[in-house]
Image (spheres, rainbow, N blue to C red):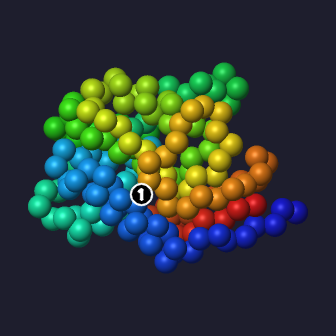
Amino acid sequence: MKETRTVLESADISRALTRISHEIVESNKGVDGLVLVGIPTRGTILAQRIAEIISRIDSSTPVAVGSLDITMYRDDLARNPMRPSQPTEMPVTGIDGLTVVLVDDVLFSGRTVRSALDALNDHGRPKVVRLAALIDRGHRELPIRADFIGKNLPSAKDERISVHLEELDGDDSVSIS
């Protein structure tokens, strides 16, 4: 039986998202021209939470939030059973010429982010794309790194990182098994 240990609790996740939010605002020099795009499912929830925190930091302009389904852009469709598609919802203003921050829960091999970049390209041409991840666990297979990280969590390749969010799972926590 595999041992599971909690590495982040609700307060830790809240602090990490607050720090990420401040870093995004500082990097962008405010909120003008900023769009957060979550990678379903948990990345979308995290993007919404970050947008709420940013609105408390700088309420001058609401930050647009979108959701980007990457299912058909994955490079492992032949090997893994396909997940059900999630809706892609981009801000009505689009993303052309804007700063887009892709948001995901766990950064691992980089393949999900590569798929997201391909999918994002079908929706417009942002001025710049940044990446925010709650957890960076290492083991990159592609030259991709996060600009904003909640927690670096070195792990073995065979370990599993599980992110639980209140909206889906009833609690906020990150565990490793």
x, y (%) of residue 84? 52, 37
Residue under pointer 1: 46
Q: Which of 126 and 143 is in front in this view?
A: 143
Quarter of the image that includes the N terminus: bottom right
x, y (%) of residue 109? 63, 39
Q: Nearer the viewer, residue 6 or 77?
A: 6
x, y (%) of residue 98? 22, 38
- Which of the 4 quarters of the picture holds residue 51? bottom left
Amino acid under disc 1: Leu
Q: Is mark 1 on a helix, strand or loop?
A: helix
The answer, for residue 134, to whether it is visible in the render is: yes
Q: Height in image: 173 above or below 95?
A: below
* Residue found at x 67% / y 71%: 6
The residue positioned farthest toward the bottom in the image shown: 11
158 vs 171, left or right, is right
* Residue found at x 64% / y 59%: 153
The residue positioned farthest toward the right in the image shown: 1
* Residue found at x 76% / y 46%: 157
The residue positioned farthest toward the left in the image shown: 60
Q: Height in image: 33 above or below 153?
A: above
Q: Which of 146 and 53 is in front in this view?
A: 146
| Category of crowding for the residue at label 1, using alpha-carbon neighbours closer than 10 angstroms: few (below 14), some (14–19), many (at least 20) | many
* Residue found at x 37% / y 30%: 120
x, y (%) of residue 174? 60, 65
Q: How many marks?
A: 1
Quarter of the image that includes the C terminus: bottom right
The answer, for residue 48, to whether it is visible in the render is: no
Q: Height in image: 11 above or below 31?
A: below
168 vs 31, left or right, is right
